[in-house]
Amino acid sequence: MSTRDSYPAGVPCWVETLQADTRAAAAFYEGLMGWTLVGSEDPDEEHDWTYLVARLDGADVAGIGALPDGLAPSWVTHVRVDSAQDAAERARATGGAVLDGPVDASPAGRFVVLADPLGAVFCAWEAEIRAGAERINEPGAWAMSALQTPDPARAAAFYEGVFGWLAEAWGPVHLLRLPGYVGGTDQQPVPRDVVAVMAPAQPGGAPAWAVDFWVADLDAAVARAADLGGRALVPIHDRPPFRSAVLADPEGAAFSLSQHAP
């Protein structure tokens, strides 16, 4: 388990799913992950169904937001920045696109929606009171995001220009490293400055940022997802030191679940 109260610039810090029916999504993820969903900064206030914060034992771990018109349900990764406006300008200068913003989400912070040159969508997050996920790398929490792209070299150049990440080949994938950052634990199999992973996109698959959550019992979680209306996109498989599966929630937003299996 890792408890966090801050994230340096350039480190992925938050994930959220955008859904046409936030109430239904809340019921699915509460049942699957054991989250409690709250709709305001004050848990005693009535739910604001436009944006819900998922909490695990009282700590913020993810978000569920209302889906803008014309978009498909998905999970979105946010990367911490000092200035959303500056991140937008760097993205444009490096061949990406600004899709929306900067948007004021006070008192939580500000964000800008960006797309890399291949079309993978993500957000840059300028924090106010919400630094990001307060617990990561434990059952019920987000572990890491992975970029799936058909052109790793072009994508690597973009993210280096925007966030200072350096790509390093590691088997069939690339590790995205932020020099000077120290995260994770001494026991992890990759360097502690790794902030994300970049993998080849599946044939016919669109470039996208995927999110992975840890669970204590993968078989039980996959069965529970099916009972709640989700479905498996990739069945349970070994990904040492993990067992993993890729699922879709009832609205079709894809995510993966992993169980540590040394």
Image: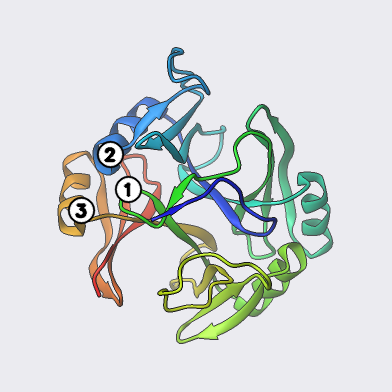
| Residue 225 rendering spot, x and y as whole percentages | 22, 46
Q: How far is mark 3 from mark 1, CA to CA?
A: 13 Å
Tell me whether the residue at label 1 lies in contact with that at label 2, contact meaning CB atoms closer than 8 angstroms.
yes
Residue at which label 1 appears: 140
Question: Would you call the spot at circle 3 few (<14 residues within 10 Å), some (14-19), or many (20 or more)?
Answer: many
Tell me whether the residue at label 3 lies in contact with that at label 1, contact meaning CB atoms closer than 8 angstroms.
no
**Which sits in the foreground, 21 or 256?**
256
- Residue at x-position 21% and y-position 51%: 221
Residue at which label 2 appears: 34
The numbered mark, 1 or 2, whose residue comes first in the sequence reads 2
Q: How far is mark 3 from mark 2, CA to CA?
A: 14 Å
In the rendered structure, find residue 222 and report the number of the disc placed on it. 3
* Residue 128 relative to residue 75: left or right: right
* Residue 106 relative to residue 211: left or right: right
The numbered mark, 3 or 2, whose residue comes first in the sequence reads 2
- Residue at x-position 54% and y-position 72%: 192
Question: Would you call the spot at circle 2 few (<14 residues within 10 Å), some (14-19), or many (20 or more)?
Answer: some
**Which sits in the foreground, 94 or 190?**
190
